[in-house]
Amino acid sequence: MTLPADTNPLERLVARAEQLMQRIESVLPQPLQSPQDWSEAIAWRYRKRANGCGLLEPVRHIGAMQLSDLQNIDGQKEKIARNTEQFVQGRTANNVLLTGARGTGKSSLIRACLHAYAPQGLRLIEVDKQDLTDLPDIVDVVAGRPEKFIIYCDDLSFEEGEPGYKAMKSILDGSVSAASPNVLVYATSNRRHLLPEYMTDNLSVQRGDDGEIHPGEVIEEKISLSERFGLWVSFYPFSQDEYLAVVAQWLSALGVNEEAIAAARPEALVWALERGSRSGRVAHQFARDYAGRETHAAATRGIADVNDLTEEAEL
């Protein structure tokens, strides 16, 4: 903005101060804004920009997953589905911590519940660990909405002293403000207590030689976050038969016939052995690889059969 040359010096100073304030405000972190249209997605992702401003981005492509697709975790599936159904129906429900072996269906189960209960108003907001300090702002934005929101934290674990640890504790249970009735936290982790645990933790209790006057309180602090989740659901590695059953289920879903599924069993076992794990994730990865090869082989056989028939007809 250019002022006339005869402008009063005081007015010129005020104008320059206003310009400076506008520039400062443009780089300051802004309050989290509610999306204009909540109906455009059933899942949202919280992202923080370089200037510190946070926003909720719609997730337009969510991996298709149905509860019926998940095999050999019936007990875990029943607990999570029951808790989620209570939540969307307005009844009391718990925050959930899903822990255990990698690739056994923890994240897939949450996605399947989202698909199952989205028609009843369930929505999901994914928050990365480094953004957990903004959880109070996120809860404030959705607190007045009619939908039910799951705050989803995948592969959650902390090192000692991380700021997100205390933010999560306050949201779960411990803040002065009451928890919003339309918000729950679902978190997955490979660590049952979300923090690293060391042999020295036990030694300090037995011998008390690490300088800590009350070593038992250190242990209490380490488990205090996980205890604030009302529902713990544990997942375990598959047995060989369970793994092969999941492989067969995925191959069938991908259109592989029964004869080819039976023939795939030895390859499936080798695949798991090479990865050092028998899990639903490994089974799915093998099924995608095998089904892709089998489809190509079937197409090649079909072309060869057509060529043979053509040659016979010419003769």
Image (cartoon, helix red, strand yellow):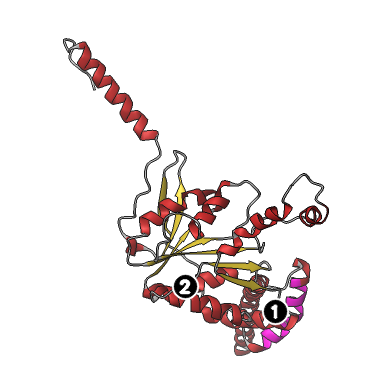
Q: Is residue 55 above or below residue 19?
A: below
Alpha-carbon span between mark 2 and mark 1: 32 Å
Is residue 66 visible in the rendered image? The answer is: no
What number is the disc on residue 33?
A: none
Dot 1: element? helix
What number is the disc on residue 243?
A: 1
Q: Residue at x 51, y 67 (%)?
A: 95
Dot 2: element? loop
Q: Is residue 122 magenta?
A: no
Q: Amino acid at mark 2?
A: Ala
Q: Quadrant of residue 244?
A: bottom right
Q: Position of residue 228 (x, y in %)?
A: 56, 63
Q: Which residue is mark 2?
A: 93
Q: Position of residue 289 (x, y in %)?
A: 65, 71
Q: Position of residue 130 (x, y in %)?
A: 55, 49
What residue span does the magenta drawing correspond to? 259-272
